[in-house]
Amino acid sequence: MPIYYKLEIGKTVFFAEKATTIPEWALGLSGRESMKNSLGLLFEYGVEIPRSFWMKGMNFPLDIVLFDHDKKVVGILKDLPTTALLSPPIYRSGVPIMYALEVNVGTTTNIQLGDQLKIGRVIAK
């Protein structure tokens, strides 16, 4: 059974699984058929550096919210498309990040640069 964390970013709320290891980061959400708009995947990195993302094996487009070590929004990669290419494009954070949140495309419309990420209680679904 997946474990979800309640995430608040400004007035926007998501429930997200966590990816904390290299294999989990590499897999991300690839292979999943779809995801509810209220869900996401939070990447927790141990070091704040620029990061890269790709859409290999993705079946639905994503937005990715990028956070620094203070859990403040420092960027949003929007409308990353799915692709059947063997070598999919690489999307770069452009700035050092400590966290990234993958969510359904279009669910980040109320999130602003500088918004604070609050990671809340564990919720089993």
Image: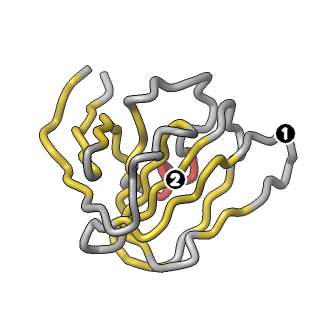
Dividing the image into 4 quarters, which one contains the C terminus? top left
Q: Quadrant of the N terminus?
A: top left
The picture quadrant where one finds residue 77 is bottom right
**What residue is drawn where x is 35% and y is 59%?**
44
Q: Report crowding for label 1: few under 14, some 14 to 19, many 20 or more residues within 10 A (C-alpha).
A: few
Identified by mark 2, the residue type is Ile
* Residue placed most toward the observer, 67 or 56: 67
Above or below residue 107? Residue 47 is: below
Query: In screen coordinates, is 99 left or right of 4?
Result: right
The residues tagged by marks 1 and 2 sit, at their Cα atoms, a distance apart of 20 Å
Please state the horizontal and vertical placement of residue 70, each as a whole percent of the image: 24, 73
Q: Earlier in the sequence, mark 1 or mark 2?
A: 2
Label pair 1/2, CB-CB below 8 angstroms: no
Tag 2, which secondary structure? strand
Q: Is residue 73 above or below residue 2?
A: below
Q: Residue at x 74, y 40 (%)?
A: 82
The residue that label 2 is drawn on is 64
Q: Say what amino acid the circle numbered 1 marks.
A: Ala
Is 48 on the left or on the right of 121, as rendered?
right
Residue 91, above or below 125: below
Number of labels in the image equals 2
Query: Which image quarter: residue 105?
Result: top right
Q: Determine whether the residue tagged by mark 1 lies in a helix, strand or loop.
A: loop
Q: Residue at x 58, y 27 (%)?
A: 32
Location of residue 97 (image quadrant): bottom left
Query: Which numbered dot is residue 84?
Result: 1
Measuring from the top left, give residue 13's x and y in whole percent.
28, 39
Q: Position of residue 18 (x, y in %)?
A: 34, 45
Q: Position of residue 89 (x, y in %)?
A: 78, 58
**Mark 2, residues whose alpha carbon is within 10 Å: few (<14), some, or many (≥20)?**
many
